[in-house]
Image (cartoon, rainbow, N blue to C red):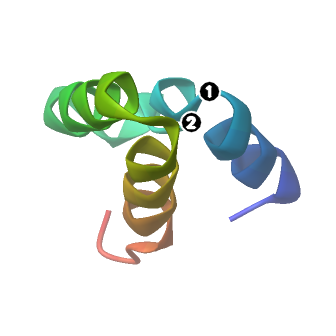
Amino acid sequence: MSIWRVLLAIFFPPLSVLDKGCGSIFIVFLLWLFGWVPGVIAALVILNNPER
């Protein structure tokens, strides 16, 4: 995970998970709408997942 991805996850979480699949984008976008912190946490968790 690069520093640019982390910064993008902090400022606009849905863009940081674009290459992780439609489901990930949708989940992060919904969490981001409900609150900034849940969206950032979900994006960072998805980005740190080594299986994807």
Can you say which quadrant of the picture contains the C terminus?
bottom left
Q: Nearer the viewer, mark 2 or mark 1?
A: 1
Task: Please give left or right for residue 29 compared with residue 41 in the image.
Answer: left
Task: Please give left or right for residue 34 compared with residue 40 in the image.
Answer: left
Cα distance in 3D space between marks 2 and 1: 7 Å
* Mark drawn on residue 40: none
Q: Nearer the viewer, residue 31 or 52?
A: 31
Res 11 → quadrant: top right
Query: In this rendering, is residue 47 above or below 36?
Result: below
Q: Is the residue marked by circle 2 packed among few (<14), some (14-19), or many (20+) residues within 10 Å?
A: many
Q: Nearer the viewer, residue 27 or 2?
A: 27
Q: Residue at x 51, y 61 (%)?
A: 44
Residue 48: image location, x then y, percent: 49, 72
* Mark drawn on residue 16: 2
> Are the residues flagged by discs 2 and 1 in contact, CB closer than 8 Å?
yes
Res 27 → quadrant: top left
Q: Secondary structure at mark 2?
A: helix
Query: In this rendering, is residue 25 above or below 48?
Result: above
Can you say which quadrant of the picture contains the N terminus?
bottom right
**In the current view of this chain or complex, which residue is farthest to the bottom?**
50
Residue of label 1? 12
Query: In this rendering, is residue 40 above or below 19?
Result: below
Q: Secondary structure at mark 1?
A: loop
Residue 8: image location, x then y, percent: 72, 36
The amino acid at mark 1 is Phe
Q: Residue at x 71, y 47 (%)?
A: 5
**In the current view of this chain or complex, which residue is farthest to the front?**
35
The amino acid at mark 2 is Ser
